[in-house]
Image (cartoon, coloured by chain):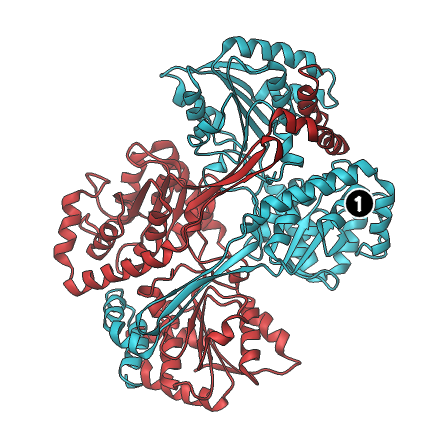
Chain colours: A cyan, B red
Amino acid sequence: MLNLMEITKENKETLIKELKGRVAETEQEIISNVNGILSKVKSEGDKALFDFTEAFDKIVLKNLEVSKDEIEECFNKVEDDFIEALEEAKANIEAYHNKQKSNGFLMTKDKGVYLGQRVLPLERVGVYVPGGTAAYPSSVLMNVIPAKVAGVDEIIMVTPPDKDGGINPYIGVAAKIAGIDKIYKVGGAQGVAALAYGTETIQKVDKIVGPGNIFVATAKKLVFGEVDIDMIAGPSEILVIADEKSDPSFVAADLMSQAEHDRLASSILITTSKDLYEKVEVELEKQINTLEREEIIRASLKDFGTAIICANIEECIDISNAIAPEHLEIMVDDPMQYLGMVRNAGSVFLGRYCPEPIGDYFGGTNHVLPTSGTARFFSPLSVDSFIKKSSFIYYSKEAIEENGEKIITLANKEGLTAHANSVKVRLNHGRV
Amino acid sequence: MLNLMEITKENKETLIKELKGRVAETEQEIISNVNGILSKVKSEGDKALFDFTEAFDKIVLKNLEVSKDEIEECFNKVEDDFIEALEEAKANIEAYHNKQKSNGFLMTKDKGVYLGQRVLPLERVGVYVPGGTAAYPSSVLMNVIPAKVAGVDEIIMVTPPDKDGGINPYIGVAAKIAGIDKIYKVGGAQGVAALAYGTETIQKVDKIVGPGNIFVATAKKLVFGEVDIDMIAGPSEILVIADEKSDPSFVAADLMSQAEHDRLASSILITTSKDLYEKVEVELEKQINTLEREEIIRASLKDFGTAIICANIEECIDISNAIAPEHLEIMVDDPMQYLGMVRNAGSVFLGRYCPEPIGDYFGGTNHVLPTSGTARFFSPLSVDSFIKKSSFIYYSKEAIEENGEKIITLANKEGLTAHANSVKVRLNHGRV
């Protein structure tokens, strides 16, 4: 099912270029629709939210906010083993993200000078959570826990109501476990608009995170600057590096675990063994019939499934670095010895018993990762995504008297005489 | 010259809203022009750079790269006191940014599990530096030093050629002192395009930083995603908090030091003393005639100069937090006692002898700061702007056997059976 490529000196660069060349563009029509929704919510507030919810979700809501009773009710609707697994996942995610916390610093210098950097949590964060059939409670944990650990004062969730005006119970449970402060039943671009501009009921936030469909993603892009946003996620990607000893059934299963996300998802096998590749092909056919999303997986593998044969593991990693995958599995013995060679990857899964879903659900690392080759410069969602830094500096009279002339020289060379003047008045006791 | 406002309970919110409500939008015409330049550089490479340079900068270049001799030549054209001041500024900026370096971490758990986070420098960064009359050598230091400290492999600068095909000598000197690896004579949107896509001569980068005119800023916005970019800077802002003991000549000078940047710059005085405000007005008139950019300062103060009278310093800071200024001066005794109340500000200047130009040029903090109220969620340019993080996790056979069922439960609830399957094959020794 995979498209086979064998790496040679001649084709290496072209191949890498092709693998990197997927960029999605948003249609003008969607942008203009979403812009209409944003400006209506900005001008009409809550009224627009009720109207759009009636139009798009086909439900007339009485209240936007989900009550405490409604949340408690969710716990009665879901299975105990789900709650237990989610609680344990939360503990793992929290422990990992606690390690990401950073401190500011203070430097002192001669003549009473001091300067430094403070690390401050954002005040209010909004989390968008899709509803309906594609409800992902794991994504609630992954977006909320880093914000909690960062110390964000208030975390607000918006999610579309279901056809009865309720919320998905798995989402409700995850929200409560993660520690969300308030939940509102509003989805789509109107949900993003409410978070970005605020309404009578929903308070304006500083940052919006969380996945969503094309309307949600477009709305987030358009409000960026008014508020901060997380990354705009592209199609999911997995890159599996395997050797001749890798179990082909593991490799096949892992490739398909990404392929099931989306017809545009990429599943790439890079291996030192053509024999393994052939066995993986057999395994793919064997396993695919047992999977619910067979059709999506077939379509995804046909268009974006790739197998690349390399001379050695070093070369495999070389190509992986050029692709900068969202998920990278290194399915070999002693995988740690190769980690230092990995330059670009969102999250790396080491060893033969570490399939990527461990990171999606349970291990502790974040599953919100840079896609489409952006791991070259973007990072996983983290505690740092929910803080801001602020610098400070103190100069004494003696310190500006010592250094003032140098500052005046630099300002004057840039033609900024009012900058120079602000130092001069202090050197000259208020005289210009 | 300032617009006076007195804070009451009634007007506080409206006032803050007005002060925050400045957002610039890029005209469609500029976007389409810039898009044309980007795609020409993408398809034609160096040839397009030579063509655009001839068209826009009116110069036919032989080479794009600035030679070592040309850089050495710059040192002969600039004054020794400039070089000395710049060298000392570099040392201060380097010392401060060295404190920003962060480490990854490793956690170990039962059954051989380990996970962690790596901090990796970006591989190649491009710095845009404006040329011509508005050449800012300080900006070269502020953009390059954090990248050097982060450990970026290669830092490339692009800057437009002057009318003789050379570069501004102050920029050349600053580039050499900052430790730029290569300089190319290409400016405008075409310079940004070259960095984003690469050409025969210029290598594609991972991130583009540095200030520029509307064409440069628009080009940066449009290539975002293909590469990372720094913030899109809005007009500069200063907010001065002062009490009855503040020297009105210092306050007036500091307000004008921002006003001279731009007609759209905001200079805001928040004070507990109406008497001080009146004296500042007198000082503004007294000092303004001595400044080269008098006309810009008058225009800026007329439209965006504001004085707000508050009951006490706490209320001053309250309003400042809502405005989230780029630069905040707290011009009082014992200023450190108020720092903890400051929630939103790019950089804070403490005390009566710490005018903002100390941070622009010399003190060590970065002068690339969040503008237009974005200090609510954005941070100063820092070492963190030039790194990315990558997570990793290892699970042993025993660890997945212990936790596998929980992961399967969570995946199945989300309808992702191929995710569950990747765990199952490992629990079942390859059988589905």
Q: Nearer the viewer, residue B121 or A9?
A: B121
Q: As drawn, which residue projects farthest toward the bottom?
A: B275
Q: Chain of mark 1?
A: A
Q: How many marks?
A: 1
Judge left or right: residue B236 versus residue B203: right
From the viewer's perspective, is A156 left or right of A63? left
In terms of depth relative to the viewer, which is nearer, B58 or B139? B139
**Amino acid on which disc 1 is placed:** Asp
Of A321 and B52, which appears nearest the observer? A321
Eyeballing the image, is B90 above or below A12?
A: below
What SS does tag 1 mark? helix
Residue A366, given in percent of the width and then of the height, sits at 60, 40
What residue is rendered at 68% in x and 48% in y? A128
Q: Is residue B405 above or below residue A10?
A: below
Please report the residue visible at 85 percent of the width from the left and 50 percent of the height from the top. A72
Return the residue nearer the eye: B281 or A7.
A7
| The C terminus of chain A sits in image quarter | bottom left
Measured from the top left, where is residue B299 in percent x and y?
40, 74
Q: Quadrant of the N terminus of chain A?
A: top right
Give the residue furthest to the front.
B110
Q: Is residue B134 above or below residue A336?
A: below
| Residue A414 seen anywhere in this rendered image of the structure | yes
Q: Residues within 10 Å of mark 1 (few under 14, many from 20)?
A: some
Image coordinates for residue B426, horizontal then vertical, percent: 66, 21
Judging by the rendered image, the residue that carries numbered circle 1 is A57
Q: Residue B177, percent across and down?
A: 23, 53
Q: Is residue B139 visible?
A: no
Examine the image and state in which quarter residue B369 appears: bottom left
Residue for point 59% across, 9% down:
A279
Task: Identify the image quadrant of residue A95.
Answer: top right
